[in-house]
Image (cartoon, coloured by chain):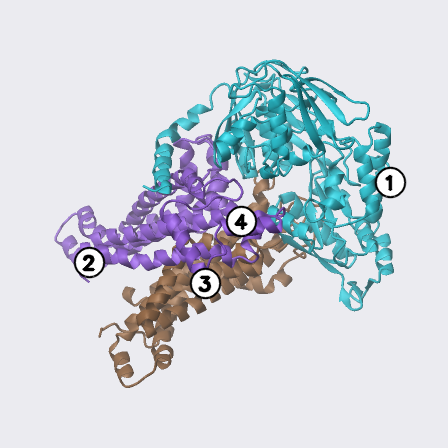
Chain colours: A cyan, B brown, C purple
Amino acid sequence: MPTPFRNFFRSLLAALVFGSFAAAQSGQNTLTLAYGEEPDTLDPQRTSTAVTGLVMRYAGDTILTKDLTGAYADGLAESWAASEDGLTWTFRLKPDVTFHDGTPLDASAVRDSILRALDPATQSPIAGSLFAPVTDIEVVDARTFRIQLESSFAPFLDNLTDPRGAIVQAAAAVELGADFGRKPVMSGPWRVEAWESGERIVLVRNDDYAWGPSYTRTGAPRIERIVFRIVPEAATRAAAFEAGEAQVVMPFPVNDVPRFLDDARFEMVSFLRKGIARLMEMNVLVAPFDDVRVRRAMNHAIDASVMVDVVLEGRGVQAYGVLPPSIWGYWEGIEDYAPSYDPDAALALLAEAGWTPDASGTLRKDGAPLTFTLLSPPFDDATRSAQIVQQQLAGIGVDMKIETIEFGTLLELAQEGTHQANLIGYTYANPDIVHLWFHSSNIGTGLAHSHFDSPELDALIERSRVETDEAVRLEAYADIQRFVADQALWVPFYINDNYIATSASLEGEQVHPDGFLLLNDASLD
Amino acid sequence: MSAYEPMANPAPRAWRRLWRKPGAVLGGALVAAFTALALFAPVVAPYPPMEMDFRAVQQPPSLAHPFGTDDLGRDVFSRVAYGARISLQVGLIAVGIAAVIGTAMGLIAALAGGWLDGVIMRSVDVMLAFPGILLALAVVAVLGPGLANMMIAVGVSAIPVYARTVRGTTLSVMELDYVVAARSLGAGHVRVALQYVLPNVSAPIIVLATIGIATSILSAAGLSYLGLGAQPPTPEWGSMLSDARAYLRTGWWMAVFPGLAIMIVVMAFNLLGDGLRDVLDPRTR
Amino acid sequence: MIPFLLRRLVAAIPVLFGVSLLAFSMTHLTPGDPVKIMLGERATAEDVARLRLELGLDRPLPVQYLSFVSRALRGDLGTSLRSGQPVAREIGDRIGATATLTLAAMGIAILVGVLLGTLAAIQRSSAVDALIMMIALVGISMPTFWSGLLLILLFSLTLGWFPITDGGWSGLVLPAVTLGLPAAAVLARLTRSALQEVLNQDFVRTAHSKGVAATAVVARHALRNALIPVVTIIGLQFGNLMAGSVIVESVFARAGIGRFAVNAIMARDLPQVQGIVLFAGVIYVVINALVDVVYAAIDPRISVR
C-alpha cells in the first residue's frame, strides 16, 4: 500500500486510540508552553525561525553564555582568552561533556559543528553569518580549540551566545539527514524527544547533564518534560493559559495583560523588547522616497506616540532611531536628534521637494498626487499601526494605501526593491544588527530593504565591527544612528514591553536579559 | 417527452403567495432594511467609518457611540452601516459571477450535448472536488488579497452549483412536449434557450442566488479571518469580527455588533430564499 | 448493482485526471519562475539551472505531467521546500486529526440534524417546530471562528467542562460541535422538508387513517424515502466540513490538513500545495463515488435507470 495511505490509516488509528491518552500525558512534572509559531526545522544551523532559537535555549548549549547581568559567562567553554590582536581566540571546554547520543562533545566535535555551519552545502541562513569571520579552527587537545578570525570582529563573543550557534553533533547530522531537523542531536539540559507536526514539540530531561553555566544549576534540571504546544490563535493561547492547560505563554497578548495582573494564580513579567517592534522602511530607489526631503518629511508627519498609546496601550516606548534603549550601543541623544513630530516642518520639506497642496489639500507635484503603497505583514499590531499612519498622513494630504501580505512574500518583495515602503520589526541581542539592515552587501540578499548604497555608511558599519575599544565602538554606533537619522531611511515607531505570563505553580524560573525564561533551576509544585 | 408543466408566468401568483408566508415576509423586510442601510450608509452613519478618535478608544456603547468604539477609536455603528455596503457588493458580485458563468456553462452543456457536455460537466466535477474555501484560497493565493479578488474567489467557488442546476433544469425543459415540437420545427439553440429555458430556469437561479448572497457573506468572513480578505481599514463585517477576536473579553461590543449583523443578514436571505423556493418550486404547490 | 458501480468508477476517472492536471499546473499557474520561487533569494544562476535539471523542468510538459502522476501513484508527492520532508509524510502525519474531527463533526451533524429535523416534521406547525427551525437558522448564519471562540468562552472558561488545547476525547467535543453545527442545521432543515413531503403523501395518510401508529408510519415508510436527499447532502457536506476544518483547526490549535493547506498556500510552498490539492481532490472524488453507491443502495429506482 503506498505510503500516504498507510500513513492515513496509521495516523487515524493513532488519533482514535491514543487520542484519549494524550490528555493524560500532561502530568505532574511537565511544563507546557503555548507558542504561536511552528519551527521550520529544529536544526539550529538551518533555521530561519525565532521559535527554533527558543527551543535551543533548552535543548542545546552554546560555547559561551551571558549571565543574568548580561556579562559573558561560561557555557560549554569553562575559560577563554584572546590574543593581543584579537584575531585568535582560545577556548577550553568543560570536561566530560556529551551529546544526547552519548558521544563526547570535545574540541574536534566543536570544530565539526562550526565547519558545518560555515559549509555552503548547509545553506545556513543565520548560524552561518554568526560564524562568518572564522577562517580556521585548530584542535589543540581534546578540550582546547583555537579559533582564527580573518579580522577583528567585535560582535564575536555575542554571536557565540546566540542559541542558533548551539553546538550540534555533526556526524549525526550527516547520518540522519533530513530527520536531524526533526530530532536534532544536541547537548542541552533537555533533549528533543518528538515533534508532532503542527501540534507540539516535546523535550525530555537529559539526566546526564552536568555542565550548566555557573550562575545557575549545573546539573540535570528538575523539570522532567517541556512541551511547546503550538497554538496559532492568540485568543486561544490566552484561554488555554487561563484554564491552566499551559503554564507559560510568551509573548502574552497585550490587551489581555490587565486582566491577569491582579490574579494570584498568575505571574506576569515584562521587559523592554530588545529590538524595534515596528518601523517603516523606505526604499530609496523608488519615488517618492528617492528624495531625502520626502523621507524626512515622513518622520515629521508621523506621530509615533499615538501608536504607543493605542496599539501598545501604553506598554512600551516610542522608538527614535534604529536601536532601542534596551541594547548596548544605543545613543541617548537620538531622542532629540531625530526628526520630531512636526506636521508644519513636514509640509515645508515637501514644498521644498516640489509637493504643494491643491484646493482639497492633496499634495501634488506636476499634477500628480503624492501617493504610495505600504506593504504590511498580517500581524495585528502592524495593521493597526498602518491604519494610524494612514490617517496621520491623510491629514497633511498624503494618500497612503495599505497592502497586507504574508511575511515571507513581503521579505521577497522588499529584497527585490520594487516596493515603496514596508513595515517590519526585529529582535536582536546586540547592535551589530545594523550590518544586516544597512550594509550594502545585504542589498538584494539580506535585510537591506532600503537599498541604500553608501560607502560612507558601509565604512561606519565596518568600523563598528572591527573596533575592540568599547568607548570607540559606542561612538561608531552613535555615528551610524545619526547617519541613518539624517538620511531618514526609516520611520521608527515603537518598542513594546514583552510580557511573559507564568503560572504561579512554576517556581525558580529566572528571566534572562536576552528575553527568555531560564528553567535550569525551575520546578513545578 | 414528459408531462412536466412549466410555469407559464409564475410571477403574479407567486408574489401573492409569498406574502402569505411569515418567514419570507420577515426575511424580505430584513433584506430591504439591509439594502436601505447599504444605500443610505453615508446618511445614517454619524461618523466617517475610518475616522479614528484616539481619545475614545475601546469605549463601550454610549449615547455618543451607540455601538461603542473599536480599538482604534472608530465608531462601530458607522462601520457596521458602511459594512452593509461592502457585504451587499460582495454578495451581488460574487453571486453575479457564479450565476452568469454557471448558467452559461449549464446551458451550453445541456443544449450542445455530446462531448462538450461531458467536458463541461467534468470540469464542474473537478471544481466541486475542491471544497469552496480551498478553491477560494487558491484563487487568492494566485491573485493576491483584497476585496476585488475575494469577490472573484468566492464567485468562482460557487459556479458549480449553478452549472449543475441549470443543466438539470434545461434537460428537463428540453423534454417538454412543446419544446420538442418547436425544435423539430427548426428552432435553434439560442431561441430555445431564450424563449423556453430561461423563464423556467430563472426560478431555481433566484433561489440559489438569494441563498448564495448569504453564503458569500460567510465565506468573505472566513477569508478575512485567514487574513486574505478585505484590506484594512475597509469596514467589512467579517474582518471587523476577526479583528475583534482579541477583545472578546474586554471589548465585547466590537465583535457582537458585526457578528449580529452577519447573522441577521444571512438569516434574512435564507428566510427569503426558503420562501421563494417554496413558492416557485412546482413540486410543493 | 455491479454494472452501476463500474460505470460510476469509470465516470470518476476523467475527474481524477482533471484533478491531477489542476494540481500539476499549480506550479506553472502562479506568476513567476517556479524554480526561482522555490530556491528563494539566495539562488545563483547555477543553482537555478541545477534544480531545474533535477526537477526535470527542462523536459516537455506532458512528460513532466506523466512523471508527476507516476510518482504520485507510488506515493511520492514531492518534497516540501520549507521543511525538506516528503509531502506525503507530512500529509499522513496530519490527516488523522482532520479525519477524526470531520467524522466526529459529521456524526454530530447527522445525529443532531436528522433527529431535530424529524422532530420538527412530526410536530409540524407548532412551537417546537418553529424553535428548532430558529436554532437551525442561527446555526447556518454564524461564521465558524466566532461560534468556536464563543463555545470556548462558555464551555471551557466559564463552565470548565471541556479542555481547550489538550487532546483526547473531551478535547474533540468543542471543535466537532463548532464544525458540525452548520451541517447539522442544514440537515435538520432538509430532513424536515423531505419528511414533510413524504408525510403529506397519500399512502401515509391512508396508513394513518387505518390506525397504524404514527411512529411506525414514520419509521417504516417516511424515513426511508426521506433519506435519499439527506444522503446526497451528506456527501456534499463532507466537502464543506473539510473546508470548515481549515478555520476550526486554527481556532482550536489542532494540527490537521486544513491549517496545513492554508500555511502551505501562504508560504508558497508549491510542492506542499500540489500534494495537498491532489490528495484532497482524490479523497473528495472517492467520497462522492461512495455516496453515490450508498444512494443507489437505498433508492432502487436509480440502479435500474
Residues tagged by mark 1 and mark 3 found on one chain of the structure? no
The residue singled out by tag 4 in the image is C51
Q: Residues within 10 Å of mark 4 (few under 14, many from 20)?
A: some
Task: Give the quarter of the figure containing the C terminus of chain A.
Answer: top right
Residues tagged by mark 4 and mark 1 found on one chain of the structure? no
Tell me the element at label 2.
helix
Of discs 3 and 4, which sits in the foreground?
Answer: 4
In the figure, residue A438 lies in which quadrant?
A: top right
Q: CA distance from mark 2 to mark 3?
A: 42 Å
Measuring from the top left, give residue A517's x and y in whole percent. 63, 24
Tell me the element at label 4.
helix
Any mark on residue B28, and which?
3
Who is closer to the viewer here, A324 or A253?
A324
Q: CA distance from mark 1 to mark 2?
A: 84 Å
The residue singled out by tag 1 in the image is A336
Tell me the element at label 1.
helix
Any mark on residue C303, and which?
2
Q: Residues within 10 Å of mark 2 (few under 14, many from 20)?
A: some
Q: Amino acid at mark 2?
A: Ser
Q: Chain for mark 1?
A: A
Q: Chain for mark 2?
A: C
Query: In the figure, is residue C195 to the left or right of B40?
Result: left
Of discs 1 and 3, which sits in the foreground?
Answer: 1
Q: Amino acid at mark 1?
A: Asp
Q: Chain for mark 4?
A: C
